Image: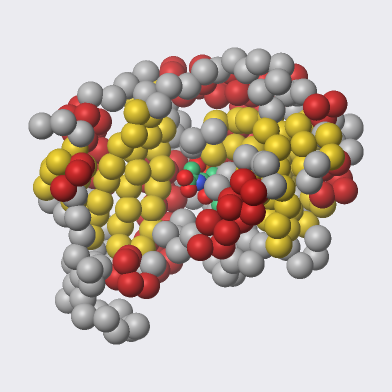
């Protein structure tokens, strides 16, 4: 049947997968999503992604369209049908289809859509593999802990970064602190060897990859501090990197045209990337509790 997608109860040809024009995701961005990595045939941090999905849905009072167990079966079935061992699964749940009206509709069933993408990953990085970052003001709403499909601010941030020759945008709040990347979490390793990333409150998305990276860093004996940091602090950092399901742990070597971390992927960054791969291949599904 070729590439397949899942749309509201059916596996369909990807090219023919469509949703209704009055889906509230299309009209109001009234929905949430997850991106889960597939490594060597298994999902990485599936429990964490499903815990965050539940958090996002609960905060917006959108019902889970299927049980956890059924969702897991559907995810596995889509991967099987597309014959993918390495890549991503994209999953989106909206409040469903209803005549356009801002308040919640009374009887609408939430809508579930899933797609997959094939991608190969490498644990090791060449010496010139670091990415460039461009800073932009963070103009998003106040509930960034919800993985909303309303991503216009991130679209603009990424476009700005691309036009500046950078791979990622680091968004900066009105107090001058970095919140996170447009589609990743932002990290620095200070000169004193402390790993710093923003605390997981409403100001950022609580990254599932970053959560595991923190766990692995602590296992390596690295001190981790969850607090805001400025661009000035990042310019002075020993290392800098981003984390996300699509990039794992990727070194940053330039911010706003200024070289950081000697312009090369840092030792701890590369180490954590390798560890995350090993973890992904061997220890998937570490139990995950959503932080309260
Ligand atoms: N983005 N912060 C933001 C704003 C993100 O969009 C993402 C992920 C992350 C990292 O979260 P995780 O480690 O759970 O992937 C942080 C996904 C990959 C995306 O939108 O494609």
Residue 273 sits above or below residue 136 on the image: above
Q: How is the image coloured?
A: secondary structure
Q: Where's residue 67, x and y in %? A: 22, 50
Q: Residue at x 67, y 41 (%)?
A: 166
Q: Where's residue 259, x and y in %? A: 83, 34
Relative to 126, 247 lies left or right: left
Q: Is residue 79 visible?
A: yes
Relative to 199, 59 lies left or right: left
Q: Is residue 285 visible?
A: no
Q: Quadrant of the C terminus?
A: bottom right
Identify which residue, 158 or 94, lies in the foreground: 158
Q: Where's residue 92, x and y in %? A: 32, 53
Relative to 118, 156 lies left or right: right
Q: Quadrant of the N terminus?
A: top left
Relative to 110, 86 lies left or right: right
Identify which residue, 9 or 19, lies in the foreground: 19
Identify which residue, 3 or 92, lies in the foreground: 3
Q: Where's residue 93, x and y in %? A: 30, 57
The answer to which quarter of the image holds residue 86 is: top left
Q: Residue at x 70, y 20 (%)?
A: 128
Q: Residue at x 21, y 76 (%)?
A: 98
């Amino acid at each position: 049947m070729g590439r397949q997608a899942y749309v509201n109860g059916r596996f369909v040809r990807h090219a023919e997968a469509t949703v209704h024009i009055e889906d509230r995701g299309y009209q109001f961005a009234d929905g949430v999503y997850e991106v889960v990595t597939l490594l060597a045939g298994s999902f990485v941090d599936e429990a964490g992604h499903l815990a965050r999905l539940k958090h996002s849905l609960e905060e917006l009072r959108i019902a889970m369209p299927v049980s956890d167990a059924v969702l897991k079966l559907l995810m596995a079935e889509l991967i099987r049908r597309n014959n993918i061992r390495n890549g991503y699964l994209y999953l989106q749940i909206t409040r469903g289809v209803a005549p356009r009206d801002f308040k919640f509709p009374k009887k609408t069933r939430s809508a579930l859509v899933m797609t997959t993408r094939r991608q190969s990953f490498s644990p090791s990085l060449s010496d010139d593999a670091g990415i460039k970052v461009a800073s932009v003001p963070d103009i998003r709403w106040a509930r960034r802990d919800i993985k909303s499909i309303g991503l216009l601010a991130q679209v603009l941030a990424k476009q700005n970064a691309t036009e500046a020759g950078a791979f990622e945008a680091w968004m900066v709040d009105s107090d001058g602190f970095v919140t996170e990347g447009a589609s990743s979490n932002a990290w620095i390793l200070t000169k004193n060897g402390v790993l710093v990333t923003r605390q997981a409150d409403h100001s950022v998305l609580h990254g599932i990859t970053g959560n595991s990276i923190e766990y692995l860093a602590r296992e390596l004996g690295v001190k981790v501090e969850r607090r805001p940091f400025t661009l000035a602090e990042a310019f002075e950092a020993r290392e800098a990197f981003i984390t996300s399901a699509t990039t794992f742990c990727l070194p940053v070597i330039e911010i706003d045209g200024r070289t950081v971390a000697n312009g090369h992927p840092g030792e701890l960054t590369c180490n954590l990337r390798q560890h995350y791969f090993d973890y992904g291949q061997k220890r998937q599904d570490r139990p995950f509790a959503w932080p309260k």
